[in-house]
Amino acid sequence: MCGAVCAGLGMDGTTLSLLTDTPSRQFLAASDDAPLLLEEIQFTVLEGPCISAAHSGEPMAVNDLREELTPWPLSGATMREKLPQVAPVYAPPFSSATTSWERSTCWRFVPTL
C-alpha cells in the first residue's frame, strides 16, 4: 500500500498509521527505513505533521523541512538532524464523515551534491 501511495503521488517514502480520538496510536506500515524513522520521531515526541493532521482533520505540509521553521519544534528539529535528506513532508488525513482515523505521512528526498 505504501508503495502505491509513493508511486501515485510521486513521493520517495510514505507511512500509514491509525490515530483515533484516544491517546492510542498504531503504526501500520512504512515504505522503508527512512519514513519509519520519521514516524518514530513523531510518536516519541508526540508532535509532528501526522499528529496535527489527525487532530485537525486537515492536511499538513512543510515545503522544505531543512529550511522551514515548523509548528512542531521538537519533531521538526529532530527530523532535520536525523533525516537531512528529507525536504517536503505532507500529512493528509483519511477520515470518515465524523472522525479522522487514518493518516499517511509522505515525503520526498532532496538530492545531495
Image: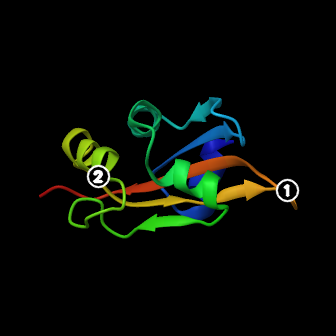
Instruction: Compare residues 32 and 43 and report the one nearer the observer.
Output: 43
> What's the residue type where badge 1 is placed?
Ser
> What's the residue type where badge 2 is placed?
Pro
Name which quarter of the figure residue 30 lies in.
Answer: top right
Give the percent coordinates (x, y) of residue 112: 17, 55
**In the rendered view of the protein, which quadrant contains the N terminus?**
top right
Which residue ends up furthest to the bottom in the rendered image? 63
Q: Are marks 2 and 1 in contact (CB under 8 Å)?
A: no
Is residue 87 shown left or right of residue 6? Answer: left
Give the percent coordinates (x, y) of residue 49: 48, 54
Which residue ends up furthest to the right in the rendered image? 97
Colour mapping: rainbow
Instruction: Compare residues 85 and 99 and report the one nearer the observer.
Output: 99
Q: Sequence-wise, which precedes: disc 2 or disc 1? A: 2
Q: Residue at x 59, y 65 (%)?
A: 59
Name which quarter of the figure residue 108 lies in.
Answer: bottom left
Residue where numbered disc 1 is placed: 96
Q: Residue at x 72, y 43 (%)?
A: 21
Q: Is residue 71 above or below residue 27?
A: below
**In the rendered view of the protein, which quadrant contains the C terminus?**
bottom left
Q: Residues within 10 Å of mark 1 (few under 14, many from 20)?
A: few
Q: Secondary structure at mark 2?
A: helix
Q: Residues within 10 Å of mark 2 (few under 14, many from 20)?
A: few
Q: Residue at x 56, y 53 (%)?
A: 6
Which mark is drawn over residue 73?
Answer: 2
Give the percent coordinates (x, y) of residue 27: 60, 30
Instruction: Compare residues 71 and 15 and report the one nearer the observer.
Output: 71
